[in-house]
Amino acid sequence: MRMVVLSLGLALLCLLRAEAGATGPDRSKIAGKWYVVALASNSEFYLREKDRLKMVMASLSVLGEDKLKVSFAALTPEGCRRRETIFKKTSDKGEVYLSEGGDKMVQVLDTDYKSYAVIFATRVKDGKTLHMLRLYSRRQEVSPVVMALFRRFVKEQSFTNEMIKMLPSQDECRVDEP
């Protein structure tokens, strides 16, 4: 669970990538609330625990030109776990690196900033390379078109259907409550 929770916020930073052109992204487009609604991963921990996972809520705030504050809340067996982390952009292409419990590289594969983002993350931990694909949404549900898009990326990244988890919504754990 810790790996999933720690990497969820990191992946949101990738929303900073430019959609097109050399001027860079309008970072204000990513500010606000997001939900992690679906995951796919080859992580042994994820595969073992995926049926216990629930939707995660995140709130993003832009800090200056290259920093992003990510606050997120995840429901764990111990209760609601909230975390706040500041991430630093390290590439104009939206890829970032954070050395917290392992090497992580994340990349936005597709987003419209208004309703969804598909994010691919790679993490090296204990000598193993772990991959995770995440579907972020501004709402707790996604359209069939967006879900089909996510499934296409799942297939392109060589994940199997058994590695996919649509996360059930939860209202007990919100990022915007104390």
Image (cartoon, rainbow, N blue to C red):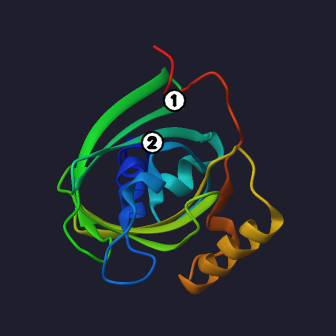
Q: Residue furthest front?
A: 23
Image quarter (top left, top right, bottom left or bottom right) of the C terminus: top left
Q: Is residue 74 above or below residue 78?
A: below
Q: Which residue is mark 2?
A: 1
Q: Is residue 150 left or right of residue 44?
A: right
**Residue displayed at 28% across by 39% down:** 85
The image position of residue 91, as x and y in percent, is 22, 73
In the picture, residue 90 is in which quadrant? bottom left
Q: Is residue 118 left or right of residue 65?
A: right
Work out whether residue 142 or residue 42 is closer to the camera in this orientation and state it.
Answer: 142
The image position of residue 118, as x and y in percent, is 55, 67
Work out whether residue 75 or residue 21 is closer to the camera in this orientation and state it.
Answer: 21
Q: Which residue is mark 1?
A: 76
**Residue displayed at 21% across by 48% down:** 64
Q: Is residue 158 left or right of residue 94?
A: right
The image position of residue 164, as x and y in percent, is 65, 63
The image position of residue 157, as x and y in percent, is 53, 82
Q: Secondary structure at mark 1?
A: strand
In the picture, residue 13 is in which quadrant? bottom left
Work out whether residue 49 or residue 28 is closer to the camera in this orientation and state it.
Answer: 28
Q: Is residue 4 above or below residue 145?
A: above
**Amino acid type, callout 1:** Thr
In the picture, residue 114 is in which quadrant? bottom right
**Amino acid type, callout 2:** Met
Q: Secondary structure at mark 2?
A: loop
Marks 1,2: beta carbons within 8 A: yes
Q: Residue furthest right?
A: 144
Q: Is residue 22 left or right of residue 149?
A: left
In the rendered structure, find residue 14 and report the number of the disc placed on it.
none
